[in-house]
Amino acid sequence: MYKSEQLALSLKHLIESGVWKPNEKLPSLRQQAETSGFSLITVMNAYQELEAQGLIYSKEKLGYFMTEDPNTIKIAKTVILNEKIEINSTIFRYLKSIQSEDIIPFGIAFPDSQLLYSPKLMQTLGQRAKHRLSYEQMPSLPPGNLDLRKLIAQRYCMQGIPTDPSDIVITSGGLDALNLSLQTLTKPGDYILLQETVFYGAWQATEHLGLKVITIPVHPEHGLDLDAFKNAITHYPIKVCLLMLNSQNPIGFTVSDAIKLQLAKLLQEHQIYLIEDDVYEELYFGHKKPLSMKYFDQQNRVLHCSSFSKTLGAGFRVGWVYAGKFSESIQHLQLMSTLSVNSFIQNALAEYLSHRYYEKHLKTLRNTLKRLKNQYYQYLIKNLPDNCQVHYYPSGYFLWITLPAYIDGNRVYHHMLEHKVSIAPGSLFYRSEKIPHHIRINCSFELNDKTQNALDLLTQYIAHYESNP
Ligand SMILES: Cc1ncc(COP(=O)(O)O)c(C=O)c1O
């Protein structure tokens, strides 16, 4: 964090606690520099930041004054500006730390590989490998294999989303789809809106592209807080938001159709683009696949990103973006980076998806994940202290756990790692001054002696920590 951000944040806390009355004059720049120990320029930057947030205003030659609008202060409590994101090194260290094969991988982001890589797909890959044409031909250039794009387009059509194969660009996984979409729609210094607690790849992408991030809180009931969303887009010049609305990682919620519809209207009214991260779209437990925002999109404002990483195998690195009118610009960016996605794998996936194997595989995968998630949930609510909250949502394979506020998720992670068990600490998913008191557990692994032992260790450690804070 920059010094000016630090100072702006502590001044914001003072403002929120009511230290200054509406229209009261704030200490002058010089006074503030003396009391805070920061330089004049730092103080000036901090004041300007608070002014941009509408918390204070300036009068020429007179100085800075408190806003008279109490609503702005309420908004400031929920909508947060993060100017300089520095998370990539933390994620890098974390991912390296959990890589070893002898670690029980409750911290990883992919389902147990035993559940992916379906035998039929492996058979298709083997057969394709014998046809030299499938890998000797020219690399499949952007936008990617036409057959595969046709099949993906068909899946959108089945959900009531009219789609042409030319709307789809095949990418190197979902993360590439998100990065390319962001790169297409933003330039460094632009404002982007994220949920407060999100998949760390979103933070990394904003760091990489030098974006200013506005976060809105997660609504405890609806997942997406529409009021905070409205406040954020009216107070900041936001042109793009990146949201997960189905089986959100890490928390797990799925936003209702009613809220999605309202969100679509707001995007339209305020001319905002949405990059929708929907990589868990197939992992629902109910009878009906949740709709994506693309369904509600009348004006081509949604770039829908998804991938086969969570359903067929992360190792294939095949994803896509429903890019619509942005297809060309995304392909241009691809030509300067990955050039093309592995053509052999694309061919094999197209062949596999053209049969009914995929639907059967998805059905089995969903049933297994549902069974495992229920088992882990039952175990955790029985064995964790009562003041821990395990958030259960009927989709995906993550359980998000809120620990008592004094239990540091990072300490739980380090302790478990010493015992060769990984978990994902909350600090990977949000930026907070407070103790990051959350953890995420991947519950896609069958319960056997090893995984059961690992869960016992985890619950015992948390119980011990809870009674010896
Ligand atoms: C929410 C979310 N989006 C995107 C990705 C990246 O997917 P892929 O492996 O296809 O790049 C992940 C992977 O963990 C994810 O959890």
Image (spheres, rainbow, N blue to C red):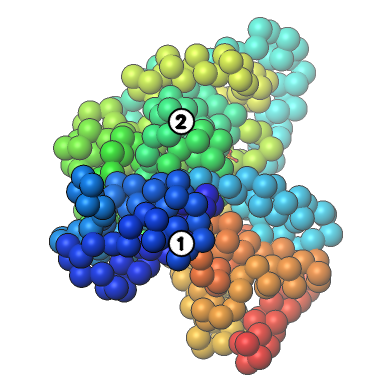
Labels in figure, total = 2
Relative to 257, does residue 452 appear above or below in the rendering?
below
Q: Residue at x 56, y 63 (%)?
A: 426
Q: Please rate how many residues cluster around mark 2, counting C-alpha atoms within 10 Å: few if below 14, some from 14 to 19, many from 20.
A: few
Furthest toward the top, the residue is: 138
Q: Secondary structure at mark 1?
A: helix
Q: At 75% from the left edge and 21% from the top edge, which residue is drawn?
A: 129
Ligand 1 within 8 A of label 1's CB? no
Mark 1 vs mark 2: in front = 1
Give residue 435's position: percent from left, percent from top: 55, 71
Residue at the spot of label 1:
34
Q: Looking at numbered disc 2 in the image, what kind of residue is underneath it?
A: Pro
Q: Quadrant of the C terminus?
A: bottom right
CA neighbours of label 1 inside 10 A, class few (<14), some (14 to 19), many (20+) = few
Q: Position of residue 330 (x, y in %)?
A: 46, 20
Label 1 vs 2, first from the N-terminus: 1
